[in-house]
Structure formats: C-alpha cells, structure tokens
Amino acid sequence: MTGPERLDLQPVRGMRDYVGIEGAHLLSLITLFWEQVSLFGYTPCLTPLLEEAGVFSRSLGETSDVISKEMYTLLDRGGDPLVLRPEGTAGIVRALLSNRLHQDMPAHLAYAGPMFRYERPQKGRLRQFHQVGVEHFGEASPEADVESLLLSWRYLTAVGIAEDSRLQINTLGDPESRSAFRCALIQHLTPVAHTLSADSQRRLQTNPLRILDSKDPADHQALIGAPALQDFLTPEARAHFDRVCEGLRVLGIPFEINPRIVRGLDYYVHTTFEWVHGGLGAQGTLLAGGRYDGLVKTMGGPDLPGVGWAAGVERLMLATLSPHIQGVSVVVIPEEDTPSFYAQALAQDFRNAGFSTVVWAEGSLKKRLKKAAQRSIPHVVFVGQADGDAGTLTLKMMATGDQHQLSRAAAVTFLKGVAS
RNA sequence: GCGGGCGUAGCUCAGUUGGUUAGAGCGCUAGGUUGUGGUCCUUGAGGUCGUGGGUUCGAGACCCAUCGUUCGCCCCA
C-alpha cells in the first residue's frame, strides 16, 4: 500500500500564514483601525471577497495594471466571470448601491480584509494581502477631504508611525482641469517621445499623467520644462485644494505637496495623497487615497461625490514593532489523582476574574514547570486529590519561587492583589 | 511581465579546488543533579542537502529546468 500522495505543504505563492506573534500583530493593527473609525462615526461595511468582474472593470479603468493583468478571475459553475477583489472601494460602491445607502447621505463606511492581486511577490507586496480602508460618500467639500486625512493621520498615530511617515498630497483638479493639462502634457512630450522609456511611450497613449511619477531618469529629463497641472487648475479646483491645505495646517497635520502623486486607479479627481514610510524601499506607500467624485455614477448610481483611503496592513506590520502579547497568567498543574475536572473548574475561577489560564494535565512535572518558565507564565497552581476534596490549591509565584496554600476564593483575591 | 541574489535539521548557520556512513549551536526527547523550572552533565530523535533532470567512476557542492524566497524594475497598499 502506498501512502497518500505527498502534498506540497507550502502555501500558494505570494500568500502566507500569520502564526502566533504575527497573527497578533495583524489583528492589533486591524483592531486599532476599528477603534479609530468608530471614533469618527464610521459604519462597518464588510463585503464579499468575490464580486462579478464588471464591478472592477467598470470602476478602476481598463488601462490600469490592476485591471489589465493583476486580477484573479474565475468562472462560477454557471459560467459567469467572478473576480477575487483586488481592492476595496469598488465593492463598497457596489454595496452602497445594492443597499440603497445613497438615499441616506452622507455615508461613512469602513472595511478591513484580504485583497488579491496576481503580482510578483516581494517585500511588502503579496498576492493575498490585507487592507483597512474608509469611504466617505455624499460630501463634495474640501472639509470632507480634510476629515478623511485627519482620520488617516490619527490611525497612523495610533499605530505609532505617523512620525516616521510623510504625507504627500496633490490635486488632479476637476475633469476640466485634467483634460486641459493632459492635452498640454501630450503636446510637450510628443516631440521627445523617442527619448522616453518604453513604458512611458505606452503611457503617452493610454495614461499620460502616469509618466509624471515614473522613476526612469530619461523620463525625468523629458519632463524638464513640462507644463504643470497647477497651471491648468480651474479656479474652483484651485480653491478646493487650497482649502484642503488650509485644513491640514489648522489641524496641525504635517504634509508636503508633491505634484507627482497621480495614483494608478482612474477614478481619482481633486485631492490625492499618500503616506510614505522611509524604511520600506520600493513598497514604502503605507496608506493612500483621494477623492473619486465620478465613481458612483460610473457604476450606475447617482452622481455622488466620494473620498477615501486604504492602508496596507502588511506594510504597516513592516513599519511597526510586534505588539507586546498579553501572555498566559496562570497555569494549573493537576496531579494524576486530582478529582476529575477540578483543574478546569479552578481555571474557570481565574478566567472569570480576567486571568488568562491554561491547564496542563500531561507530561512530567519538571517538563511542565520548565515550559511555564520559558513562557514567562508568572503563576503556577498545583492541585492534588486533597485539594479537590477541600477546595484548596497551592499557588507558586515563579519569579520568587514562593508558594502559598490557599482556598479557591482566596487565590482569586490574591492574584488580583498581585496584578494591581 | 523583466533582471540580479539566495534555498543544507523546527531556528541560525558550517560544510575546504566535487571523493566514503552530511556537522555545530539553540530548540525538542529521555534521564541525573539542583525540594517542583530557569545552572550543570549525559541520552535520544530529527535532514528525499527546495524539486526534477544532466555532467562525472563519484555532487550538498558543477550545468539546465522548475518551485519558493529576496532585491531592483514595473505596479500599487
């Protein structure tokens, strides 16, 4: 008889397990996120991982890389194309419309969960990764942009990395500003198109604005003397952006204007921004977002303005220290002749009092004590047959080695005294 | 999708110009000494040398492919 076929026990490329401290790290960042968004009155909006393909192809723009080559697509049994969501906003807009939330504006929605992009994995870039994000619909004013930015700042502050990160903002203007600028940019670059990088020559046709944030030196050269979007802003767009900057200054949020922040997804207008961390190399963007006033309409809804952002949780993990895990406080070690489940009953007492408690009933005493010491568990409770009958226990303080004979009730009181 | 580095026990790594039964530390196992742990001593288990081909009398070491990982590009969070 041959055994079962050997499984490849590696996770799928670009996907990973979060075990122990890493799992705690991931969860702690998500917990901090929910704490902050609830302080801003945001409502959780958790949507499916799978959506119909049209949800994304309609919203993100056919020319974006995310759409054109990074989506995980599959057919369901009825032959309909489905997509594992590559980002959060499109699904939120779909949910907004599905649930008729647009009839009760403004709406503040928050989400957290895994996203999927078929990319070449590297540090800070996974095929399944986690994002936390917020979307704010129904308010077109720069004040809404500022509130969203304020929330992002508070979140990064809560996470502990606001000081190591820089907020860069820019404006893409309204559609009018943008198309005027686009024409001028094409006019400037077309005569020197042959000097551009291959990617940028392609972009010149599809999405010329993206040439602005190319890292290619040749492109930088070609851009010298290029028109600036600033000069093409309509008075309204200019006023919107100035107001956003004013808000940031009033609220004490440090920022810098970077005309090269243009964003990859097509739905952005007006304000765009990125929080960038210094120590993460090429994947240094921790959190990014902006205003997307045309998106809801593009997806078949009313003409609703929106602004929001998303943060990459794995990148936040790279930029922060692992949390201090609240470890186990008490381990109960019963002798073999202890009445059945007396140890678990005791453990319940401790848990009810808020102490993380485990029961170790097997193995040599020496081994169990050694393990308790290795894991820095501060309290060990020994119980035997006599304890079970009398309702008592022996509590050992691992730090000092002191032991106390106590009743169950006294033990809880004692632990509370030690803890406080 | 493109280019470069890496891939030896659970972890961190040694393995000389290819040569017999692949090593160390930590961890794990069992035991001894510390009253029931953190010290010390002893014992044991655990490796298809990422995988598959090839060169060779002989490959962990060389070649090819492949998978994974990592860095840069690209993209983006």
Image (cartoon, rainbow, N blue to C red):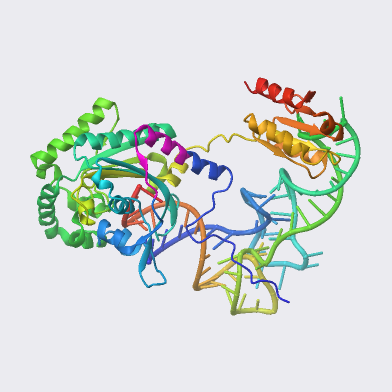
Decide which of B12, B63 is in the foreground and name it.
Answer: B12
Q: Is residue A161 above or below residue A289?
A: above
* Horizontal side, residue A161 vs residue A303: left or right: right
Is residue A126 highlighted in magenta?
no
Tell me if residue A394 comes above or below residue A26 in the rendering: above
Where does residue B56 sit, x and y in percent of width and height? Answer: 65, 79
Quadrant assignment for the C terminus of chain A: top right
Q: Is residue A188 left or right of residue A266?
A: left
At x 13% / y 56%, what residue is drawn? A186
Q: Is residue A386 visible?
A: yes
Q: Position of residue A134 (x, y in %)?
A: 33, 43
Q: Which quadrant is home to the N terminus of chain A?
A: bottom right
A349 vs A139, left or right, is right
Q: Nearer the viewer, residue B27 or A31?
A: A31
Is residue A71 toward the left or the right of residue A273 in the image?
A: right
Q: Quadrant of residue A42?
A: top left
Q: Which residues are magenta?
A: A29-46
Rendered residue at 51%/61% (across/down): A12
Residue ID at (86%, 40%): A337
User: Is A41 a magenta residue?
Assistant: yes
